[in-house]
Amino acid sequence: MPVVNRIAALHSDITEWRRDIHRHPELQFDVHRTAALVAEKLRAFGCDEVVEGVGRTGVVGVIKGRETGSGRVVAMRADMDALPILEASGAAWASTVPGKMHACGHDGHTAMLLGAAQYLAETRNFDGAAVVVFQPAEEGGGGGREMVKEGMMERFGVQEVYGMHNMPGRAVGAFAIRPGPMMAAADTLLIDIEGRGGHAAKPHECVDTTVVAAHVITALQSVVARTVDPVESCVVTIAALHTAGEAFNVIPQTASLKGTVRTLSPGVQDIVEARIRALAEHTARAFGAVATVTYERNYPVTVNSAAQTAFAAAVAAEVAGEAAVDAATPPLMGSEDFSFMLNARPGAMIFIGNGNTAGVHHPAYDFDDDVIPAGCSYWVRLAEKAMPLGG
């Protein structure tokens, strides 16, 4: 079955919703305008229940099918927040808020799920309840974690949960998915180094934190190369180095390193954390400095359940054709806080192609509106196939 005819007819409306959201980006939990727009539309569509303020600023809509005897409840999730990036897309619908833009396509995700909600509320060709979840703060705030902690799954009786994210570089409307680890855990790393500052002409009287920091950075490169099993995946990146010094002739007293660690399994995560601590602390000590490591486990691995992944791939094939569905795509080392929802209920995250656009988190990125019909049709068919009438 190709794109749903009614969805094709709604394409221009959904595009306008998407572009309106794009013009007014909001960050993390501060998505009040977007959440209000979502709630307003869900009520206008005739959803049976619309709840605002879930996970602080999330919105959940419940659409009951023509029949509900099956007791089935399937949730579909979209994220709403933007990024603190100055837009350079040049689009007529570019951000009107300096320093903020939808650089990851969450505007498209929200609009596509809204389109599917309108269709499902109009037709109700399923037996059960479709729960549409609009989440804040995916970009670093852990909005998915907050919605789960608040009891969203129990409150709405969710049995399975599905997510979708656009993927630049893959053909528009094509899909990619895999069972098991789909996206990496994302941990944050802070290393504070305390040395002994002084005059740059008297280094022998100092403990130079800049030199110590350089050696720590170099030592950390061995974590992946010489600690992690070569068949496993891991990334250790130091993204920022700051010292307390600004003068040309002063050796700084302190330095700090900031970075991220990405892994696809808890076992590797444990090994890497322990090794980073040991290398940083002992390297600093060898120079007479002290290193304090703050390692925070942020988003866990996004793990797709086997049965739900196979189901999602079959739904995508109905929409796009089997040739346009990669059911064994390699995992990505990016992260997703949809992982918290998948830890709470079985389900699957799927990627949908965004064509030859700039990559996500790039100032020139823009969601391709030609993706909308396939994305909306996927959601519609997923709900109808997961909860079939007469099934």
Image: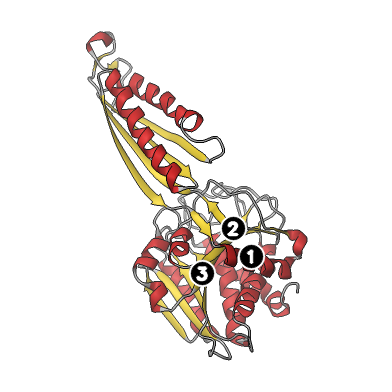
Mark 1, residue position: 310
Which amino acid is tagged 2?
A: Pro
User: Percent position (x, y) of residue 81?
Assistant: 47, 60
**Within 10 angstroms of label 1, few (less than 14), some, or many (20 or more) residues?**
some
Q: Residue at x 44, y 73 (%)?
A: 59
Mark 3, residue position: 161
- Asked if the residues shown at circle 3 and circle 1 are in contact, with their CB atoms under 8 angstroms apart, the answer is no
**Within 10 angstroms of label 3, few (less than 14), some, or many (20 or more) residues?**
many
Which amino acid is tagged 3?
A: Val
Which amino acid is tagged 1?
A: Ala
User: Gap in Å between the C-alphas at discs 2 and 1?
Assistant: 8 Å
- Asked if the residues shown at circle 2 and circle 1 are in contact, with their CB atoms under 8 angstroms apart, the answer is yes
Q: Nearer the viewer, residue 71 or 204?
A: 71
Mark 2, residue position: 179
- Asked if the residues shown at circle 2 and circle 3 are in contact, with their CB atoms under 8 angstroms apart, the answer is no
Give the vertical position of 145 relative to 158 (above or below).
Answer: above
Labels 3 and 1: the sequence-earlier one: 3
**Within 10 angstroms of label 2, few (less than 14), some, or many (20 or more) residues?**
many
Q: Quadrant of the C terminus?
A: bottom right
User: Percent position (x, y) of residue 346?
Assistant: 50, 67
